[in-house]
Image (tube, helix red, strand yellow):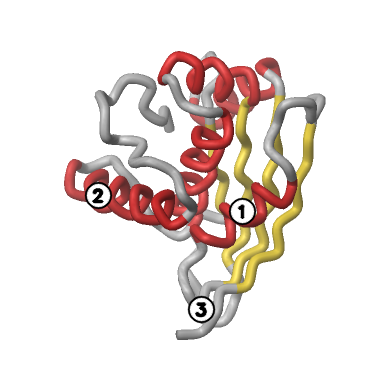
Amino acid sequence: MAKASLELTIQFQVPTDGLPSREFFRKVAAEALAAGEVAEVTLRIVDEEEGRTLNRDYREKDYATNVLTFTFDDDMPVIEGLPLIGDIVMCAPVVAKEAAEQGKTLEAHYAHLLVHGMLHLQGFDHLEDEEAEEMETLETQLLGALGFADPYAGEKDGAIDD
């Protein structure tokens, strides 16, 4: 199998104290990219105000959410040989609050959300039960490969809201 190729730009709109390192985010994103896939992704870690604005403007939901994924153009067909291009936005205060509520480490929750976002960029979704089961199974496998526990092992409280 061909190796995946990821160009990841990381932007912090919030102070980085207590956040996982750039190397951590690169490792997680690379693990979530399918073999042979080529991607150019911007990961942006934001505050509650920016998270709320983006969620309101793009999803018509007036609250900050944990992760948002934006593909370059949802309406364009996938063209063989061209990279996946997209943005993943994570809201630091929401991620921290959820991690605490769920009894997870901050790294475990960031890893889960980044894997989730990377899968969305690759066309996975969870609107239908069958799709959700496939996506959750893949998330669990990828997180296991990174040394993290199954994020769905307990109840579904604090589920990803996208």
Local packing at callout 3 (Cα closer than 10 Å; few below 14, some 14-19, many 20+) is: few
Q: Which of 84 and 12 is in front in this view?
A: 12
Mark 2: amino acid: Glu
Tell me how far mark 3 sits from mark 1, CA to CA: 17 Å
Mark 1: amino acid: Gly
Residue that carries the numbered disc 1 in the rendered image: 86
Residue 136 lies, in percent from the top left, at: 30, 46
2 or 3: tag closer to the N-terminus: 3
Residue that carries the numbered disc 3 in the rendered image: 36
Residue 57 lies, in percent from the top left, at: 59, 26
Residue 25 lies, in percent from the top left, at: 65, 48
Local packing at callout 1 (Cα closer than 10 Å; few below 14, some 14-19, many 20+) is: many
Q: Is mark 1 on a helix, strand or loop?
A: strand
Residue sitting at 39 percent across and 51 percent down? 144
Residue that carries the numbered disc 2 in the rendered image: 131
Residue sitting at 53 percent across and 27 percent down? 66
Tell me how far mark 2 sits from mark 3, CA to CA: 22 Å
